[in-house]
Structure formats: structure tokens, C-alpha cells
Image (cartoon, helix red, strand yellow):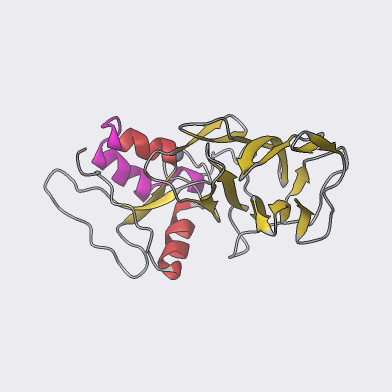
Amino acid sequence: MPAPLMRALPDLPAEARADVRARSGSGCVRCGVTIYSYFALPTLGDNRVSPLGAHGEGATILCPACHLLVEEGRLSPSQVHGFAASPIARQRHFARDRLPFSNETPELLVGGPRLVRDTPVPIAIAGTPLLMFTPPRSGVGAIRISVRLGDADGVLYRIVDANEWLITDGRWRFVQRGDRYVIAPARGDTLLVLRIVKRNRIAVEHLRTRVLDQKIEATPDWIEVDGKRMVDQVASGTLVGLDI
Ligand SMILES: [Zn+2]
């Protein structure tokens, strides 16, 4: 496999990350999606390498789909530099309604008709959150989404941490389709579909996973654990709405 064009920066310091996010409008610099990884800008044709600065100069954020376009050669390094210099989420015409831009804990549609409010963790397993939704740290930007799901063997994986896509080796896939974020492993039938219903309201349209030997499935209408259906069991106004 050839060396990646863009070096991932999992160890970029927190302050530099915050600066990169602020410069990028809290979204992928090409498409505005709020799930992204931090990368060093690619080398340009003259082999000029952008050194990383204390404020994250030389770094940028791209969603998994746009990053793949770069590595597949469908976006050029100079195009990436152009997006980083003029991020779409900072542009006035950018439509944010279908993306989770908000500065509050979102209302959630999950597990029954009663709206879930002020509950950052709607579902946890033995205290470990599967999903977490918190306001942006700086008070502006995108809702911070964190996701853990079980793979085909029922092993729990941390996939997204506060909007940062942690899996860069292709074992898990992310796509945005209109107002939906879809996460699934390359292998197995785990699935997560989040839909941005409107500003500050997110539906867990479908969650299907296995953790150890437990099968968990959730929709806006119900939650099932090993086939046992529950309705309206996710509490509002608490850190963890339902601990399985
Ligand atoms: Zn993107």
C-alpha cells in the first residue's frame, strides 16, 4: 500500500485542535460534515511541506469520505489546500440545517414517542456510553457526537470521540446522505443511522449492534435488548438515559 498523502494527526494537542476547528467552521473543510479526522496538509508538487504550527497551522480536518477522495487521487493536494484556506462551513451560503450545528444538548428521538431532553447519553451498556451528544466545548460550532459500537465479534469499538473519527484503517465506514449520518463496519451487520431532524433535534433512526452476547436494536419508537422490547424507557434530564 502506498504511503498516505495526508498524515493523520491523532496526537495533535487540544489547543491546536480547537484552533483548527475554529478556522474550519467545525466541519470538514470540503463538505461541512461534522465528523472528521485531523490531518497534516498534503505536500504540494514542489515538495513544499507545511510545518505544523502551535495553532495547528499546516493541519486541517476532513470527513472520512472526503479524505478517501484525496487518498484515491480524486482530489488533488492543491484542491485540499484551497478547501483548507476557504472552508465551506465558514461561507455565508453554507446550509447548516441538515447538519448538527448547535450549541445545546440536542433533543433526541429514541426508544419511544416521548422526546428525550437534557440527556447526553441516551443508551449505555454497563455504564459505557454507546452514544453521547454534548454541546461544543467553545460554546459555538457543532454538537459533539461520540459513538461506540460492537463489531461482528461483539467487541465494543470507540469509533467517534467528540466528532473525531478515530478509525482510519477502513474497518468502519462513514457516509453522509442528506440529513443522515450512517456508520457501519466493513464486515458484520452493525449499523447506526442518525438523522438531523431539525436544529438541535436528532433521531436515532436505527441502531443495531451486538456487544458481547447482547443484541441491541433501537429506533425512534422502541429499544430491544435480546428481542425484549421497551418503549419510553430512556429518561430525560439525566446523564445516562438507559443503562442496559
Ligand atoms: Zn467531507
- Count of numbered circles in the view: 0
Pick the residue in front: 86 or 203. 203
Whether residue 203 appears in magenta in the rendering, the answer is no
Magenta: main secondary structure = helix
**Residue found 60% across the figure and 41% down from its top:** 96
Pick the residue in front: 211 or 93. 211
Where residue 173 appears, as percent x and y from the top left, is: 47, 36
What is the residue that sits farthest to the front in this orientation? 213
**Residue found 62% across the figure and 33% down from its top:** 179
Res 101 seen here: yes
Res 102 seen here: no
Where residue 133 appears, as percent x and y from the top left, is: 66, 53
Q: Quadrant of residue 212?
A: top right
Q: Is residue 47 left or right of residue 64?
A: left
Q: Is residue 114 above or below residue 15?
A: above
Q: Is residue 104 left or right of residue 190?
A: right
Q: Over which residues does the magenta segment extend?
A: 71-90
Pick the residue in front: 148 or 59. 148
Q: Is residue 152 above or below residue 147?
A: above
Whether residue 76 appears in magenta in the rendering, the answer is yes
Q: Quadrant of residue 111?
A: top right
Where residue 51 appears, as percent x and y from the top left, is: 23, 62
Where residue 170 appears, as percent x and y from the top left, is: 39, 38
Quadrant of the snapshot with the N terminus:
top left
**Residue found 47% across the figure and 64% down from its top:** 18
Q: Quadrant of ligand 1?
A: top left
